Amino acid sequence: MCVPLSLSDLSERRSAPVAQLGAPGPDRPTLLRCIKAAIRVPDHGKLVPFRLIEIPSAARDALGEALARRHKELEPDVAPKVLDKDRTRFSFAPTVVAVVARVVESPKVPRLEQELTAGCVAFQLLQAVAAEGFAGNWLTGWAAYDPEVARWFGLEPNELIIGFVHIGTARVDVPERERPDVTSLLSEFNPDSIYFTRD
Ligand SMILES: Cc1cc2nc3c(=O)[nH]c(=O)nc-3n(C[C@H](O)[C@H](O)[C@H](O)COP(=O)(O)O)c2cc1C
């Protein structure tokens, strides 16, 4: 049984730069347990508007090369170093999982809510792997939104990539970054502000 993340763990959570994510990653049973936890998300209408696609290590070179080729096609003047980034994008972390939103027609549950549910899966996956002692990073980049890439991943027209969750072990201590001040973000609703424009 893994130890749940405490409030102080949550208060210190941070992402590791993808290039600093190395082995080990979670083994298969650990990854499956993490995904099992990650899919326990709030889900209006119980629509299960998400699925996950693992990108196996053996597929990473082919994907990287294809991304570079696609990028050049989209942007012929793209700098070679940007294409190199495309080539290595998926080559650092031992485990990479694409979280996909699959939006269903619903009279009750708007698209945004379904996408948020899928977003919760991505975040909960980060939290789950953290509970198991791994580091991670949720990245998108242009590839997440490109229709050609979506085709390579076998996405249906109602699906979109919410993010690629890169998982491994951080090779560096990730420094803290500046965080917003909680008191500046929390305000209180004032009922005096209620008025009807037709009155
Ligand atoms: C939907 C989504 C997409 C993201 N895509 C990228 C990305 O493509 N590149 C990037 O550098 N950070 C991206 N980030 C931000 C990182 O996941 C991470 O939050 C950021 O580096 C800050 O680190 P922190 O999680 O420790 O606050 C994305 C975050 C979200 C929620």
Image (cartoon, rainbow, N blue to C red):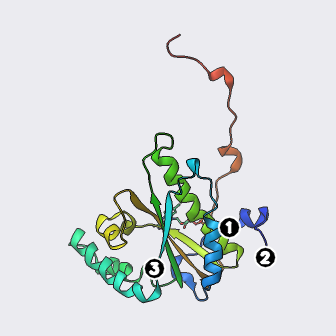
Image position of 199 with respect to 5: above or below: above
Q: Looking at this view, is 96 or 191 the one in front?
A: 96
Which three-letter amino acid code belongs to the residue tagged 2?
Met
Does the beta carbon at disc 1 come under 8 Å from ligand 1? Answer: yes
Q: Secondary structure at mark 1?
A: loop
- Left/right placement of residue 88 relative to residue 35 reads left
For residue 13, the mark is 1
Closer to us: mark 1 or mark 2?
A: 2
Mark 1 Cα shell of 10 Å, populated few (<14), some (14-19), many (≥20): some
- Residue marked by disc 3: 55
Taking the spot 68% from the left edge, 42% from the top edge, the residue there is 186
Task: Provide residue 164's location: percent of width, then percent of height.
Answer: 48, 70
Task: Provide residue 152's location: percent of width, then percent of height.
Answer: 33, 73
Q: N-terminal of the two: label 3 or label 2?
A: 2
Closer to us: mark 3 or mark 2?
A: 2
- Left/right placement of residue 129 relative to residue 144 reads right
Taking the spot 44% from the left edge, 53% from the top edge, the residue there is 103
Question: How many angstroms separate mark 3 from mark 2 (CA)?
Answer: 27 Å
Would you say the residues marked 1 and 2 are in contact, meaning their CB atoms lie under 8 Å apart?
A: no
- Residue marked by disc 2: 1
Which three-letter amino acid code belongs to the residue tagged 1?
Arg
In the rendered image, the quadrant that contains the N terminus is: bottom right
Q: N-terminal of the two: label 1 or label 3?
A: 1
Does the beta carbon at disc 2 come under 8 Å from ligand 1? Answer: no
